[in-house]
Amino acid sequence: MKNIVVLVSGGGTNLQALIDAERRGEIPNGKITCVIASNAEAYALTRAKQNHIQTRVLVRKDYADIAEYSAAMVEALREENADLVIYAGFMTILDEQVTKAFPYQMVNVHPALIPSFCGKGYYGLHVHEEVLKRGVKLTGATVHFVTEVCDGGPIIMQAAVPVLENDTPEVLQRRVMEECEWKLLPKAAALFCDGKITVKDGIVHIDD
């Protein structure tokens, strides 16, 4: 059984999707053992506690710089014996100490079809605002491994939804979450915990 540690900053809707999937038996070889928040007020912590999941809080401003914060995160993840680390709306950028300590063990979901609308500055509603500005007809979400390059790690899974004529950023965000993010993240977690994901030359391969 793989230990899954989820990193959060806000409401925790992606965390809830993972909790629900685990409860339904869709992540048979993984268990969410800890939720670590960068924000002590994050509602995601309440979701974790309601489901009897251990929580920790690491607030960025409590540390001198990103390097010190990242070192504290590595220590916390090691203490929790993390096999898989999932970014679920985690808004604090960590440095390469963390990705080097957990190579191809850290997963993020991004609300666009990478390599479009990704990288520095593309997060939350900003992504969907830019999608609408460019008039693209399809958008979606991408689950990828976290590396030192922002949104640049190997792509694990993607799913797409149509962009509709009267969409607002908020409406589009909700569609991407419901139809892509909340489905992809548990699937990727299950595949990882089943040992079905390998990375070769920067490309993810999924075993049948």
Image (spheres, rainbow, N blue to C red):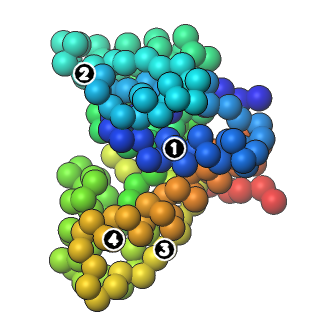
Q: Crowding near pointer 1: few (<14 within 10 Å), some, many (20+)?
A: some
What kind of residue is marked 2? Arg
Q: Quadrant of the N terminus?
A: top right
Q: Earlier in the sequence, mark 3 or mark 4?
A: 3
178 sits to left or right of 129: right
Q: Position of residue 66 (x, y in %)?
A: 25, 22
Vertical relation: 164 (above or below) 142: below
Please tell me in which quadrant of the rendered image residue 59 appears.
top left
Disc 4: which residue: 172
Residue to which mark 3 is pinned: 160
At 26% from the left edge and 85% from the top edge, which residue is drawn? 166
Element under disc 3: strand
Residue at 37%, 18% in the rendered image: 57
Q: Amino acid at mark 3?
A: Ala
User: How many badges with numbers are in the image?
Assistant: 4
Q: CA distance from mark 4 to mark 2?
A: 30 Å
Residue at 28 percent across and 14 percent down: it is: 68
Q: Nearer the viewer, mark 3 or mark 1?
A: 1
| Residue 119, x across and y down, in percent | 29, 53
Query: Could you tell whether 117 is left or right of 76 in the image?
Result: left
Real-space CA distance between mark 3 and mark 4, rounded to the nearest whole angstrom: 12 Å
Badge number at residue 101 = none
